[in-house]
Image (cartoon, rainbow, N blue to C red):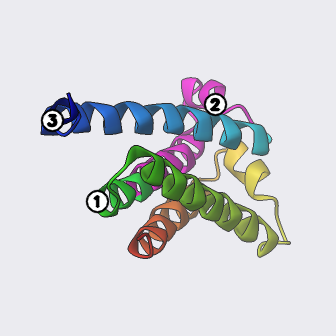
Amino acid sequence: MSGFWEHPLIETAASYSVVILCLVVFMAVFEIVTSYNNWKEIKEGNLSVAMATGGKIFGIANIFRYSIEHNDTLIQTMGWGLFGFILLITGYFIFEFLTPSFKIDEEIASDNRAVGFISLIISVGLSYVIGANIM
């Protein structure tokens, strides 16, 4: 039975399932910390929210890519993925803190595409830095 769990198709399906579950949970956390409703705004065509949300999704997925690549077990993968998510969300709060002249959430909610794009780039960029340090 142990050979069953080591088959590449089974490992891929397991990793995929874990990452999807974690992505849903992490996006729910992002939904709580933002002052706008991501999916409602996206449905209404708010491109800034779509860019910021897409950057978060890409960032989380990229962190898990590194985690899967460098870890042997799903528990290790989830642990590093969680740690990476905590760092990613910390980066979001730092971004908010470093722009005291305006509120990031308000600008994104009002479809300020420059802020939405920078938010996307920050999430993607940080995910590569975080991922490079995953062991």
Q: Which percent across, then down, holds residue 4?
A: 17, 30
Mark 2: amino acid: Glu
Numbered label attached to residue 82: none
Q: Earlier in the sequence, mark 3 or mark 2?
A: 3
Magenta stretch in the rendered image:
36-62
- Disc nearest the viewer among 3 and 1: 3
Mark 1: amino acid: Glu
Numbered label attached to residue 3: 3
> Which part of the image, by quadrant, shows the C terminus?
bottom left
Give the spatial CA distance, label 3 vs label 1. 20 Å
Mark 3: amino acid: Gly
Q: Which residue is mark 1?
A: 69
What residue is at 44 percent from the left and 76 percent from the top?
Answer: 133
Q: Which percent across, then down, holds residue 105?
A: 75, 50
Can you tell which quarter of the image residue 89 is in?
A: bottom right
Left or right: 132 in relation to 88: left
Number of numbered callouts drawn: 3
Numbered label attached to residue 41: 2
- Disc nearest the viewer among 2 and 1: 1
* Residue 54 lies within the magenta run: yes
> Mark 3 falls on what kind of element?
helix
Can residue 90 be seen by looking at this rendering? yes
Label 2 Cα neighbours within 10 Å, binned few <14 / some 14-19 / many ≥20 = some
Can residue 114 be seen by looking at this rendering? no
What residue is at 20 percent from the left and 27 percent from the top?
Answer: 1
Placement of 124 over or under 25, stated as above or below: below
Q: Which percent across, then down, holds residue 56?
A: 53, 50
- Disc nearest the viewer among 3 and 2: 3
What residue is at 74 percent from the left and 58 percent from the top?
Answer: 104
